[in-house]
Image (cartoon, helix red, strand yellow):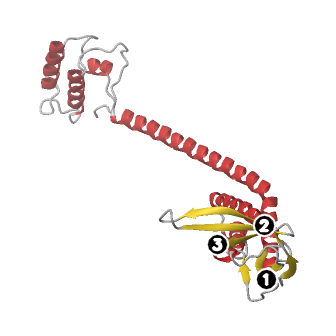
Amino acid sequence: MARSKINYTDSISTLDLSYGSSIEEIKEAYRKLAKQYHPDVYQLDSGERFKEINAAYRFLRKYPDPPENPTYQPPTQTTYNNRRGEEDQKRRAYYKRKEEKKEQEAHQKSEMFKWVFAKVKPIIFLMVIFNCLLAIDYFLPDVKEEVGISKIETVRVISKYSSSSSSYTYNAHLSNGKAFRLSKSEIGKIDMVEKFELKRSRIFQEPITLRLKSKQDVVLFNEYGLFRVFGFIIPSSLFLIIAYFFLVKNSDYRLTIFLILMIISVFQLFLVI
């Protein structure tokens, strides 16, 4: 049976040659042995010797020069499979390291979010309390008190499509320290010497309406107020808080919700103060 692994030394030995034989010597030795051990002539081994001679000659024709290492053996299918197995092992090891790194990064990110959420939890609870108080304040009966107007100032000028058409907004400073936003159409109804009945919320004292004491049919609405213009912010904040605690599990989305709540809370405080 022909050898499955062939090297230079074995091939030279099979053809009865010496180390470093020339290509002509290799051809001559092959022709001589091939005639001697051809299956039609030599029938003692079922052609196995002839197969070895052919295999040795094919190898020496491809690699006629002796290697520096006499035991050198060119890559065979077995060697190729071994190398491929080693490459597969390296590939699996690479992806394993990559997966471990990914898991480590995910763990670190998870720990970071836990730390962040632990720090912001008291702030979220303050937002819950604040918005619940705003909601309660909205539904409680309004408080009425008599006030006067100490000063009126222009706080905003909005230019429209032409310079001849402008809209003015005014801030009326009340005697109780609160401010009441009025439009241009309402400013003509104001007489600073008269007294007004202010309707405000109970907890945060948010101004809602002004009514002239002498003319009960003249009612002025606070143009820019938490309960009038931005009342939708309160239920929106409460919904976001519920989503933060119960509906959203993704840490990135929860952090985004917290940042939105922070912006809303700052805006609410600006309107209330």
Amino acid tagged 2: Val
Amino acid tagged 1: Leu
* Residue at mark 2: 272
Q: Quadrant of residue 242?
A: bottom right
Q: CA distance from mark 2 to mark 1?
A: 24 Å
Quadrant of image for the N terminus:
top left
Quadrant of image for the C terminus:
bottom right
Circle 1 SS class:
strand
Q: Of tags 2 and 1, which is closer to the observer?
A: 1
Q: CA distance from mark 2 to mark 3?
A: 23 Å
* Residue at mark 3: 184
Q: Which mark is residue 37?
A: none
In-front residue for pair 140/31: 140
Amino acid tagged 3: Lys
Residue occupying image coordinates x 59% and y 47%: 102
Query: Within 10 Å of the Cα at label 2, are there few (<14), some (14-19), or many (20+) other Cα atoms?
Result: some
* Residue at mark 1: 212
Q: CA distance from mark 1 to mark 3?
A: 17 Å
Query: As displayed, is residue 172 above or below residue 22?
Result: below
